[in-house]
Image (spheres, rainbow, N blue to C red):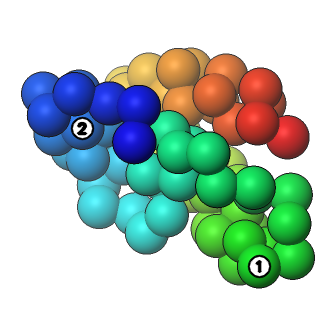
Amino acid sequence: MDLDYTTYMELLRLTKGAFGWQHLYTEAPLDDWEFERTADRIARMLDVLPQVFPDCDYTPLREKWDARR
């Protein structure tokens, strides 16, 4: 995983414990069928969290997601 502990904890707080966000920071092939559910969860998380928590900045996660697709 391409994160240090402090950043991991900050992102965990930002993502409110949503499942699968960690895969954005691995070499997991998110476009592979084996990770299809994980990719769907990440996409939904990035759609819903900014609506529910508009004061939080999800730009870094969105950029990471866009770079991985």
11 left or right of 30?
left
Q: Which mark is residue 56?
A: none
Q: CA distance from mark 2 to mark 1?
A: 24 Å
Circle 2 residues within 10 Å: few <14, some 14–19, many ≥20: some
Mark 2 or mark 1, which is nearer to you?
1
Vertical placement of residue 29 versus 26, above or below: below
**Residue under numbered circle 2:** 8
Q: Quadrant of residue 2?
A: top left
Amino acid at circle 1 = Glu
Indicate the quadrant containing the N terminus: top left, top right, bottom left or bottom right. Answer: top left
Q: Residue at x 43, y 51 (%)?
A: 22
Q: Residue at x 29, y 55 (%)?
A: 16
The percent position of residue 48, horizontal first and vertical second, equals: 59, 54
Task: Give the x, y percent position of residue 66.
Answer: 78, 30
**SS state under label 1:** helix
Q: Residue at x 49, y 64 (%)?
A: 20
Mark positioned earlier in the residue sequence (2 or 1): 2
Q: Quadrant of the C terminus?
A: top right
Q: Which residue is mark 1?
A: 34
* Position of residue 29 in the picture relative to residue 15 (left or right): right
Q: Is residue 35 left or right of residue 28?
A: right
Observer-nearest residue: 68 or 19? 68
Residue 10: percent from left, percent from top: 20, 32
Q: What amino acid is labelled 2 in the image?
A: Tyr
Image position of 64 with respect to 13: above or below: above
Q: Is residue 61 visible?
A: yes
- What is the x, y in percent for residue 29? 75, 55
Q: Residue 67 versus residue 53: which sits nearer the camera?
A: 67
